[in-house]
Image (tube, rainbow, N blue to C red):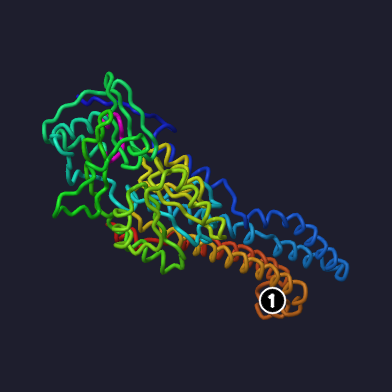
Amino acid sequence: MVELRVTGVGSDTTLGKVRGLIASAEKTRLPIMRMVDQYVHYYTPAILMIAAIVWFFNPDDILRVVLVLVIACPCALIVATPSAAVAAIASASRLGMIIKNVSHIEAVAHIRAVVFDKTGTLTEGNLEVARLNPAAGVELSDLLEVAVAAESQSNHPAANAMRTLAAEANVSWEPPDNFTEVTGKGVLATFGNSEYRVGRESWLQECGLDTSAAAAVPEGVDTGGMTFAYVARDQQVLGWIGLRDAIRQGASEAITELQDLGIRQCCMVTGDNRQVAESVGHKLGITEIRAECLPEEKVTFVEELKSSGMAVAVIGDGVNDAPALAAGNIGVAMGAIGSDVAINSASIALMHSDLRRIPFLVALSRKTRAVMNQNLLFGAVLIVGGLMAFIFGNDLLDYLAFRMKFVQPSVFKSLLAAFVHILGTLIVVFNSARLVRFGEALESRDE
């Protein structure tokens, strides 16, 4: 017997949302496509005028007029940008990058600054408790019990790490009567008449608690790279819990590739303390580090970069960083599978957490823009060259038809016009199709 439990159906599932996003992206339009549409209503009257002029000077040669209309049909121009955009979306989707609007493809090419979150983005986000540091007269078990009880209803990685340690140490706890998560600062839980707080040292100090007695670090203890969560019960600070997180595999490589692509600034903004932030940032070669930032301060930093004239991409986990993701010119949510907040707040959602996708996305955007320009230039040259050939090269075409004795001149010219028209469109489509295979090296490296 197989028992199944349905958690979502149809468009409510992650796959359904991804399918919907891809379908919506293919219906959106690039700025360059809108520019072409803006001038296209001048094109048909101009071609009809040219055909009328040709007919005026050659009233007995109606075939030449028809051939001018055939060769001027702008199929190559019409498919120049949409074909490249769809191919780029297909290439990105194959590597797990869901682009919500096709205009974001072009916007990524202009990015000059990238802002990374730390926890869950540059690091794995799987925090582990590295040290328990109780204040004088406080037992380790008491410190851990208070911390876990206060964090019992939180889904923050730090809360998960504490619960894991408590389970291993057989430390039990009761759920709080009331629970409040103070964004970017910590959690407040009440148990009867007692208040438990777990969070930043600065937040506890704002609440009027003295952390000096608990902040002392024992001699010989290496706290490098640790994130600190201070624990308090009522007005007593019980100590702190140190947590460590591993740097994400591929993060250093991704930042190096971004710098090679001409990204001026690779920045990190995080709510962690400065020591931890600088430790991670220096290992990765990040140029600017902002630590101990609240969510609104992250948004302010992004706005500062934008006001300096740079297009900014924000990379985060899509939950705590939703405001900053929305503030950037481009927001990229890492590991967005199953996360509604990530998919809704970001411009681009990554279905996994491989940071090497970011430089690939920049390269894909620039390649797509180059292919679009190639297609548009080729389509324009093809139409102008064809018009010149059929308007002024009639004698040359008659001579070529004469040399091909088994084809009448009128048939030869008609076939030639149709062939040039179809061939031009095929060349544009196949030139765009090259983008579908873009990134195969990254895909094979993953395997």
Q: Is residue 51 magenta?
A: no
What's the residue at 18%, 34% (across, down)? 143
Tag 1 secondary structure? helix
Q: Nearer the viewer, residue 180 or 157?
A: 180
Q: Position of residue 270 (x, y in %)?
A: 37, 49
* Residue extending furthest toward the top: 192
Q: Position of residue 387 (x, y in %)?
A: 73, 70
Q: Position of residue 422 (x, y in %)?
A: 61, 62
Q: Position of residue 96 (x, y in %)?
A: 38, 50
Above or below residue 280? Residue 176 is above
Above or below residue 73? Residue 139 is above
Q: Nearer the viewer, residue 356 or 267?
A: 267
Quadrant for the N terminus in the image: top left
Q: Which residue is mark 1?
A: 401
What's the residue at 64%, 64% (across, down)? 421
Judge from the rendering whether residue 437 lies leftward or rightward of residue 277; answer left or right: right
Q: Tell me if mark 1 has few (under 14), some (14-19) or many (20+) residues whose alpha carbon lies within 10 angstroms of its own.
A: some
Q: Nearer the viewer, residue 143 or 442?
A: 143
Identify the image quadrant of residue 279.
bottom left
Identify the image quadrant of residue 396.
bottom right
Quadrant for the C terminus in the image: bottom left
Q: How many marks?
A: 1
Q: Which region is colored magenta?
A: 151-158
Judge from the rendering whether residue 125 lies leftward or rightward of residue 40; answer left or right: left
Judge from the rendering whether residue 14 lies leftward or rightward of residue 330; answer left or right: left
What's the residue at 34%, 61% (across, down)? 442
Q: Nearer the viewer, residue 366 or 381?
A: 366
Identify which amino acid the numbered label 1 is placed on: Ala
**What main secondary structure does the magenta stretch of the protein show?**
loop
Q: Is residue 155 magenta?
A: yes
